[in-house]
Amino acid sequence: MKLVIHDLKKEEWEKIARDYPDAEVVTDNGNMKPCVGCFGCWNKTPGECVIKDGYDNMGYLIHHSDEVIVISRYTYGGFSGSVKNVFDRCLAYVLPQFEIVKGESHHQKRYDEIKPFTFIFYGHDISEEEKKNAERYVNAVCTNMRSTVKEVIFRECETETVCKTKDNYSKNDKVLLLNASMRSKNGNSAKLAGELKKLIVKEAEIVNLSKYLNKMSELVKELEDVSTIVLCEPLYVDGLPSQLIRLLEKFQNEYEGGRKKIYVLANMGLYESRQLINLFSSVKQWCAKMNFEYCGGLGVGAGELVGGITEAVKFGKWPTRKIGEGMNRLAEAINTDGKTEDIFAGVNGFPRSLYIAIANSGWKRMAKKNGITEKDLYRQV
Ligand SMILES: Cc1cc2nc3c(=O)[nH]c(=O)nc-3n(C[C@H](O)[C@H](O)[C@H](O)COP(=O)(O)O)c2cc1C
């Protein structure tokens, strides 16, 4: 059985459906929920997502397919919001435990197999550089999902929406820190955004994207006047979380305000912050489409450790010294309307092997707390 994940309109899909006889087809029916980052698919109902909206069995579907075909509009170097939503709900396909793969930390396999993925990106005039971005991105996704890229195909399609951004800059000098994590209050993005806010001398406000999931047009409108946005988000399946991609798409389709300065404050669960490269690239590509000014950002590795200790240990001291330095540089750029290069920081002096050992043993404790055994964590569905 082939598994096809796509974002095509019904009539477009019907034109090509005969090429995929007997395929299991996954597409957004309008009710798909974003991943809430609870890790329940690892430590409560291992192998299955806890959100029962019809997209809870993605790990099962991938495992039981012979190959996976992904058809997506080329969107800022990766998948459209709806295809990315499906990928964010695929976490259960791998295990929570880390191991070293190709010199970097990644998740262990739940299933003893290497699933082949074919990616078909469609878009208007996709440049050679954009093709390279997409290839780098899907390779990262497959490394993370312990799968393999069979083929990457690019298809030309009709003209895409051209943004209507005005030439002047938006007037309100307020800094908007947009927390794009669904763990709005106690998440690591929220904690890091809180630390950054302390260093910003201008008026600054943290806004949670989770409050606007069903009214993103309203948010786009509300942000029209704001001159500076800091996108604060976790790395999800090597890219931006789907709810943020959906917002960025909304901007491209509906925004009619002035230019903006865009900064990034991203964090991730794995150890090496360089794995955030595709996320940074996506924001840059979105800025280019919107005629917004990309002004740099800070990428933080080992985010669960960093978020977990921010209250217990003074932020900016060991082991978050390098992250604190990066945060100061980012704040300085924001305070002076300036730019910074992209800064990739981690928990220097805190060995990767120790981080992995602590993370891996933590899942056993969580399983016990949730009334399941350590063996259950490895459940195959
Ligand atoms: C669906 C999903 C996908 C994730 N994918 C990645 C990933 O590709 N690489 C990584 O390092 N961490 C990944 N993580 C871990 C998060 O980036 C990490 O837990 C982060 O600290 C969460 O931030 P938050 O608390 O602000 O949501 C993923 C988490 C979830 C829930």
Image (tube, rainbow, N blue to C red):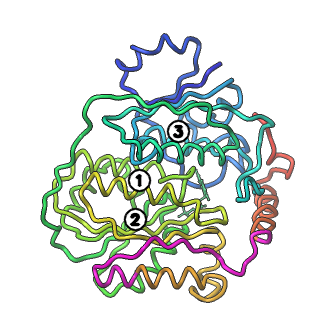
Q: Is residue 359 left or right of residue 309?
A: right
The amino acid on which the numbered mark 1 sits, given as a three-letter code, is Leu
Find numbered disc 3 in the image and state the secondary structure of the residue it sits on.
helix
Position of residue 355 measured from the top left corner of the image (x, y, whole percent) = 75, 70
Q: Is residue 40 above or below residue 13?
A: below
Residue 274 visible, this orientation? yes
Which residue is identified by label 1?
Answer: 244
Q: Quadrant of residue 334?
A: bottom left
The amino acid on which the numbered mark 2 sits, given as a three-letter code, is Leu
Q: Is residue 262 above or below residue 16?
A: below
* Residue plotted at (44% across, 36% down): 31
Q: Earlier in the sequence, mark 1 or mark 3?
A: 3
Q: Nearer the viewer, residue 333 or 81?
A: 333
Badges 2 and 1: C-beta atoms under 8 Å apart? yes
Position of residue 331 measured from the top left corner of the image (x, y, whole percent) = 40, 82
Ligand 1 within 8 angstroms of badge 1 C-beta:
no
* Residue plotted at (30% across, 55% down): 288
Q: Is residue 99 above or below residue 21?
A: below
Badges 2 and 3: C-beta atoms under 8 Å apart? no
Which residue is identified by label 3?
Answer: 86
Is residue 319 magenta-colored? no
Q: Residue furthest front?
A: 128
Question: Which numbered tag is attached to residue 231?
Answer: 2
Find numbered disc 2 in the image and state the secondary structure of the residue it sits on.
strand
The amino acid on which the numbered mark 3 sits, given as a three-letter code, is Val
Q: Quadrant of the N terminus?
A: top right
Q: What range of the chain is rendered magenta?
A: 331-354
Is residue 335 magenta-colored? yes
Position of residue 123 measured from the top left corner of the image (x, y, whole percent) = 35, 34
Q: Is residue 328 left or right of residue 138?
A: left
